[in-house]
């Protein structure tokens, strides 16, 4: 039996004009200022209070239905990635004291669906991918709605579509939308991105895992998804330096934490090569003047840089990697992806081994150090997350917590198996 999103794609291929027509109508509807006014919030709040049982039942079905989608098998944007977004959302719920149940439901739905439109990008290359990102979730929601009597109010669905459509904006000024974007942005750098980046950036996009020595990279970085975006860790350097604001009460602290992790990853990636280290951290080392820097190479706080470099040195002292063969490096990469439950692309082994066999022992050692650091930090993050799951929760937060708890326990079991 074909997955629902695949069936929708086949139908849309017969009438691609319908995508643009629907995109125009939806944008007009979710751009209505009334959608985020207090009167609409009050209406949705009453619905959430009066429909608790129906909402719990529907979310139970959603966890199942989302897993069954074909797009959830796309490495880097798979179900594991959705869970990581939801994990961030659950922590952010605790940071606010005044998030309503309806707002939490809206945020959860947008986290579920914000990347399902990616499955359509290669098929409809002439259509603006930003339209696909909200049109496809809209069609999915409608298809699920047709199957069930108890579903979500139109106003809620439109707010969810706005949250998804506005993901390209640094800030919207709408709390729920900005929280949804933060959940996504927390996965762009630090150790959260390494396993899924192996699948998508290395396995599918075939980016190089070694940081290159290119003088121009001390002044400017390639913009992600452009022709020059060819290097795995350089893309994460871009996001580290250009991370959009994280708006939650603890957002600044979270941003510094994941940026520091990213400094460690970059430092490990260029260990033993002073010239590449100076290239990567040129702004922080004062090697280039501010006016020489392109906007892509913004300096990060010096304290974050220094703490990250010190952590990288401590990690290297405690972790001695001895077996540097290509096969071992591939096995460790695959193990990390298995632990994090990232879908492994069909050609991943061939692609990664072809790179590893070209590299020096030092370059493979650096790659293995990055993997080992990511594996350990993700283990620590899971333990912290599991403790958070035991705190009292109600409503949709309790439903999400149960699913996340199951996933984190499964990942921890795999971590012990591979450690």
Image: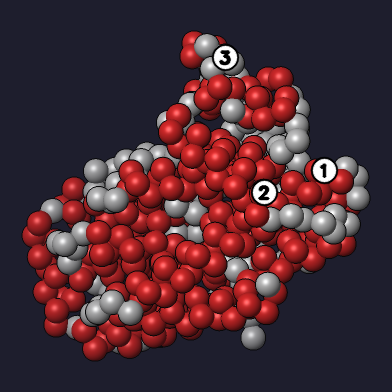
Percent coordinates x, y for residue 278 in the rendering: 65, 25
Circle 3 sits in a helix, a strand or a loop, which is it? loop
For the question of whether residue 33 can be seen, the reply is yes
Distance of label 2 from label 3 (alpha carbons): 28 Å
Q: Quadrant of residue 348?
A: bottom right
Q: Which mark is residue 288?
A: 3
Kindly indicate the quadrant of the structure image that contains residue 110. bottom left
Position of 155 with respect to 183 (left or right) is left
Picture quadrant where residue 235 is located: top right
- Choose the circle earlier in sequence order: 1 or 3: 3
Task: Determine whether 357 is above or below 3 in the image.
Answer: above
Name the secondary structure under disc 1: helix
Which callout, 2 or 3, points at the residue further toward the start of the chain?
Answer: 3
**Horizontal relation, residue 141 to residue 35: left or right:** right
Disc 1 to disc 3, C-alpha distance = 28 Å
Q: Residues within 10 Å of mark 2 (few under 14, many from 20)?
A: some
Disc nearest the viewer among 1 and 3: 1
> Residue at point 59% right, 33% down?
223
Mark 1 sits on what residue?
A: 362
Q: Is residue 262 visible?
A: no
Q: Which circle's residue, 1 or 2, is located before the other in the chain?
A: 2
Whole-percent x, y for residue 303 in the image: 43, 33
Query: How many numbered marks are there?
Result: 3
In the image, is 50 to the left or to the right of 334? left
Q: Secondary structure at mark 2?
A: helix
| Direction from residue 330 to residue 21 in the image, left or right | left
**Residue at (32% x, 54% y) in the render:** 179
| CB contact under 8 Å: marks 2 and 3 | no
Residue extending farthest front: 317
Q: Which residue is mark 2?
A: 316
Find the distance from the CA under tag 1 to the CA under tag 2: 13 Å
């Amino acid at each position: 039996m074909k997955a629902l999103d695949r069936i929708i794609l086949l139908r849309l291929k017969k009438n691609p004009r319908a995508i643009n027509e629907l995109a125009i109508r939806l944008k007009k509807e979710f751009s209505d200022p009334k959608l985020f006014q207090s009167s609409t919030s009050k209406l949705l709040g009453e619905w959430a209070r009066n429909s608790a049982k129906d909402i719990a039942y529907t979310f139970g079905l959603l966890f199942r239905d989302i897993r069954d989608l074909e797009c959830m098998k796309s490495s880097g944007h798979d179900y594991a990635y959705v869970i990581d977004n939801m994990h961030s959302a659950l922590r952010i719920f605790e940071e606010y004291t005044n998030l309503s149940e309806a707002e939490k439901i809206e945020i959860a739905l947008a986290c579920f669906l914000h990347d399902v439109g990616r499955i359509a990008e290669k098929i409809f290359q002439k259509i603006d991918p930003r339209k696909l990102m909200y049109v496809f979730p809209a069609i999915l929601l409608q298809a699920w709605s047709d199957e069930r009597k108890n579903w979500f109010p139109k106003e809620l669905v439109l707010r969810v579509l706005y949250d998804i459509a506005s993901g390209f904006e640094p800030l919207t000024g709408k709390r729920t939308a900005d929280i949804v974007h933060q959940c996504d942005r927390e996965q762009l750098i630090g150790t959260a991105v390494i396993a899924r980046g192996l699948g998508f950036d290395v396995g599918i996009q075939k980016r190089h895992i070694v940081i290159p020595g290119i003088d121009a990279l001390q002044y400017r970085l390639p913009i992600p998804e452009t022709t020059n975006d060819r290097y795995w860790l350089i893309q994460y350097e871009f996001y580290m330096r250009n991370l959009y604001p994280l708006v939650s009460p603890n957002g600044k602290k979270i941003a510094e934490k994941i940026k520091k992790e990213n400094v460690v990853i970059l430092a490990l990636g260029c260990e033993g090569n002073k010239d590449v280290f100076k290239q990567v951290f040129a702004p922080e080392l004062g090697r280039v003047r501010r006016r020489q820097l392109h906007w892509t190479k913004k300096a990060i706080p010096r304290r974050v840089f220094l703490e990250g470099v010190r952590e990288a040195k401590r990690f290297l002292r405690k972790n001695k990697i001895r077996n540097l063969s290509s096969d071992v490096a591939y096995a460790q990469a695959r193990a990390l992806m298995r632990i994090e439950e990232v879908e492994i692309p069909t050609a991943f082994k061939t692609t990664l081994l072809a790179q590893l066999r070209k590299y020096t022992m030092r370059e493979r050692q650096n790659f293995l150090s990055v993997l080992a650091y990511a594996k350990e930090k993700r283990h620590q993050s899971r333990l912290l997350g599991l403790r958070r799951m035991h705190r009292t929760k109600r409503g949709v937060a309790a439903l999400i917590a149960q699913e996340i708890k199951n996933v984190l326990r499964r990942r921890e079991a795999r971590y012990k198996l591979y450690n």
